[in-house]
Amino acid sequence: LRSPPLLTIIDETVVVGMEEEEEEDDDLREDDDFENDNASNIANVGSSFPLVVDEKEDVQRTITEIKKQMEIADVGLAILMSESEKLESLAHGMEEERCMAATTHDCDEEEDASSSSCSSGEKGEKEYAYGLPEESLEVVEHFLQEETLGCMSTNGKGTIFLSQNGHAAYTSHIPKALRNILQQRQTSLPTPIYVSIGTKARFYVEFEDGKAEWYGPEKLSDCLEANADLDISSVAFGKLWDTFFVVFSDGSWEYHGKGLPRGLVRLVVEDRRRLSDL
């Protein structure tokens, strides 16, 4: 017993050796696991990289497709705009033909309109000749006998007069808004010095202090506001709602709409090359 059997030593050696081998095996297994993990991570990275690339390619394809759709939409929009312009041109042409037919009809009716003249007979006084509906003649003659005419305007049915001292007289069929302005205006306020009326309730009236009121298409408002630093010489309305011709005090002018007489447009635009001397 004092000298343990060699087997014990051998056993211990064997045990120790086995333990060392187990430790080595554990280390090897850990190393294998680490390598396997690294390999797995590398594999994962490798497998995810194509996925990122695929996503980028998908985004690029989507962007390309969107651009193609936008180009197609632009082409469609251009076609629609072209068709819209054609329809608008056709509508304007039909409207002009209608207006020309209406003008011919109006001319036939003008033959039935009463014509008259008026003169005070005094030296230096003006004489007037006019052709207006029968119902207007009494108002016209009375006004011209009593007042000195400053301005007159007619829309074919209604007529309005302004005297040089600011008095106004008018027949029926003038724009209601204009009539209300004149009737409700206080006598202490500046008097009207210029007036123009058209069909479709359009009008322009200017007062002694330079202020004005009007009713008409938006383009007319744009024109007057853009040239607010200029005095107005005249405003004329055409048969169509958006048709007008404005002359300013410096001789410049501006017009809009399709219903102007072709002879007038040819004269001021083509023959006179848009000279600003009206």
Image: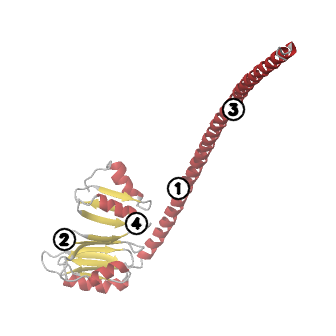
Q: CB under 8 Å between callouts 2 and 3?
A: no
Whichever of callouts 3 and 1 sits on the residue coming sooner in the sequence is 3
Q: How far is mark 2 from mark 4, CA to CA?
A: 24 Å
Q: Quadrant of the N terminus?
A: top right
Whichever of callouts 1 and 4 sits on the residue coming sooner in the sequence is 1
Going by the image, does 100 lie left or right of 195? right
Dot 3 crowding, Cα within 10 Å, few <14, some 14–19, many 20+: few
Q: How far is mark 3 from mark 4, CA to CA?
A: 66 Å
Residue 214's image quarter? bottom left
Q: How far is mark 3 from mark 1, CA to CA?
A: 61 Å
Going by the image, does 185 lie left or right of 1? left
Q: Nearer the viewer, mark 1 or mark 4?
A: 4
Q: Nearer the viewer, mark 3 or mark 4?
A: 3
Residue at (30, 57) in percent of width and height:
253
Residue 16's image quarter? top right
User: Tag on residue 217?
Assistant: 4
**Residue indicated by mark 3:** 48
Vertical arrangement, residue 254 with respect to residue 54, above or below: below
Query: Residue 172 location, x and y as percent?
Result: 36, 84
Mark 4: which amino acid? Pro
Whichever of callouts 3 and 4 sits on the residue coming sooner in the sequence is 3
Whichever of callouts 2 and 3 sits on the residue coming sooner in the sequence is 3
User: Tag on residue 209?
Assistant: 2
Mark 1: which amino acid? Ser
Whichever of callouts 2 and 1 sits on the residue coming sooner in the sequence is 1
Q: Tag 3, which secondary structure? A: helix
User: Tag on residue 89?
Assistant: 1
